[in-house]
Amino acid sequence: MSNTNGIHTISILVANKPGVLVRCAQIFARRAFNIDALVVSPAVNPKYSRMTITLQGDIGTFDQIIKQTNKLVDVIHCSEHTGLDAVTKEYALLKLKCPTEAVKTAIKKAIKSKAHIVDQSVKGVLIIGQSGSTEELDDLEKVLKKFKIIEMVRSGKLAMAKGLEAT
Amino acid sequence: MTKKNVTTKKKPTAKITQTLTGAEALVKCLENLGVEYIWGLSGGAAIPIFDALVGSKIKLILVRHEQGATHIADGYARATGKPGVVLVTSGPGATNTVTGIMTAHMDSIPMIVLTGQTISPMLGKDAFQESDIFGITMPVVKHSYLVKNTNDIPRVVKEAFHITNTGRPGPVLIDLPKDITSATFTGKTLDPEMDIPGYKIPGKGNLADIKKMAKLFNKSQRPLLLIGHGAVLSRADEAVRKLVYKLKAPVVNTLLGKGCFPETDSLSLGMLGMHGTAYANKALTRCDLICSIGSRWDDRINGDNSKFCIGAKKLHIDIDPAEMEKIVSPDASCVGDARLIVEELIKHIEPQDTQAWLKECDTYKKDYPLKHENKKGLSPQFILHELQNLTKGKAIIATDVGQHQMWSAQFNLTLEGKKWLSSGGAGTMGYGFPAALGAQFGCPKDLVFAVVGDGGFQMTLFELATVAIHKQPVKILIIDNKYLGMVRQWQELFFDNRYSGVDLEGNPDFVKLAESYGVKGIHIDKASHVRERLQQAIDHKGPVVIHAEVEKEDNVFPMIPAGKSAYDMIIEAPTTKLEKPTGST
């Protein structure tokens, strides 16, 4: 998935073998592509893993990168998906430092943004989670900015091709 | 074919009849795959494998440096088409192979590199002679393995040999921890199933793509065929010949495409590019269609890509999909095996009238021939010209890298792809001599010449010991100009004669050096001696070092400065100062 900022989301199905992540990463690094986010998870068949990678760089060399990645012996399949043929989701965890009097407002705002409360076991600290599109998570961050966000962890995009097409 | 003519070879047994160590299983697998030679240098982590080679039918050749082993294996592979096998130890033994692996990778050469490794519990703990060779070599191998289980050895070896020499060939490294090769092999078979579902080998190519290319050919009045290494690797010689004769088109070849179409043929314009013939480069500026068969449009060919064959239709045949649109955006292309694609393409070609075009190319040949003269001393080109007169393209020639390489490429016309060995992509000095030795191991009946410079030869000359011990009758022709000549040429032409780091003062007496290894040495410094002494070397039954002291400051022409196009070719020595080149090296 690409936008005008040169951000691409690609999905790679790989044989679950040592070194495969490094082999892919080397191809991106050599062409000065910066990996923004990377998710690796087992595929349905545990022999394989699925990587979803969000990266930025020169669009002119991007097709070449897909081809070179496809060439790796341990890569079964590598493709870029556009917003039309695939769905993407990511997940974010935000940790807020929140004085007791502000907690209620924070929770209210978060729930309005379709987020949920993950943890409030430590007084004055709130962990909020949300899944959604990149834009939805960016919005959540904006909404909660006035409470002090002390940490944020985002999963990076997960992509899946629509219909029967292989991701 | 009648049944009588079918010879059935007995399949080597994959059944295990005795207890084997991992190393013994490895050697048995290599034997079953038909490996004749292993070039190697021993060391602690590889001792179990060297031990397993005792009594094996595989001939172990001890080299003097691991880089030598890789280039020998590379030369063997280029000359025979079979993968060369290298065996070294861990740490520095393994890292010494990196240059040779990179050289093979750049030129798509099948090679198996077996490296000993520290015991697996010590991996990553800075053990003695531990190097992460699996990690270090990742960008320069086609594939690699770090074996973690003794029982995986047969599958890994089978996959490695399959991967190295199918599709676009390339080196495969297998890192073998010592505990893994020492442990008992308890697997059921030495011939297991492979497990490489991601490995795809493009085959005969898409028919629609081929027809699209044929259509463009059928509209072309001035077609030009560009033959690259891919055509040599796919053994497309015969198919290319048929295509050329059907099209009646002129042919140019890359440095590594030499010989696939005989350079002595009247339709051949020889090598194109930076130091190609003037007529090959003139043809580039005039063709209305250029079809690359297994060339990757290297910057040594294209120079300035925006001015490459302006206005001509560009066609591209390559087995590697990643080569498509990498440098050139073709008007038509086909991914697959060069031989199979060309065979199909021929069927769809309707020959056009190319008489005028061929006549034009002939004029270029007459007007801009390759030149040399012995005015200022013994000319290196003259020696290579005489070598050509004596060998007539029938000898295997392996070159090193530099001026002599380009002169040899220009003057040593090649008749068969596998008879020309040169480090093209990597430009590895020190390649030529060991590569010639590898070719000699693989083709014992052939006359093999190493054409090397005084600089490159000194990088791997220690394999003279290997030559002498194994009585390999390689002829090593040293073109000694006492300079790192190609860099000196650039400094003369583009850097105001400011010589820096190119003077090879202190060269040894190469004849005495050869003799100290028990190898015959011959000296040449006069034009009148050249033919007779080259003949003397050819007639000598064993290896010979021919030390030819040539004019020190001769330059290679024609020349297209790096980053420029064929339109900017310099045919003869310039009288005015040249701009510094902008292109890659």
Image: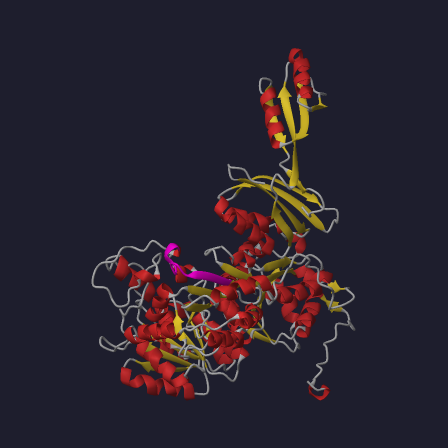
Q: Nearer the viewer, residue B237 or A85?
A: A85
Residue A134: x, y in percent? 61, 32
* Furthest-top residue in this view: A101
Q: Is residue B50 shown to the viewer in this render?
A: yes
Instruction: State which region is magenta.
Output: B306-316
Residue at the image position 72 percent from the left and 76 percent from the top: B12
Q: Nearer the viewer, residue B183 or B331?
A: B331
Quadrant of the rendering where the N terminus of chain B is positioned: bottom right
Quadrant of the rendering where the C terminus of chain B is positioned: bottom left
Q: Is residue B315 magenta?
A: yes
Residue B65: x, y in percent? 50, 67
| Vertical relation: A130 (above or below) B492 | above
Q: Is residue B275 shown to the viewer in this render?
A: no
Q: State the colouring used for the structure image.
A: secondary structure
Residue at the image position 34 percent from the left and 88 percent from the top: B532
> Can you tell which quarter of the image residue A113 is in?
top right
Residue B75: x, y in percent? 50, 72
Number of numbered discs present?
0
| Vertical relation: A51 (above or below) B545 | above
> B4 left or right of B449?
right
Q: Is residue B79 magenta?
A: no
> B26 left or right of B95?
right
Residue at the image position 51 percent from the left and 58 percent from the top: B323
Q: Nearer the viewer, residue B128 or B404?
A: B404
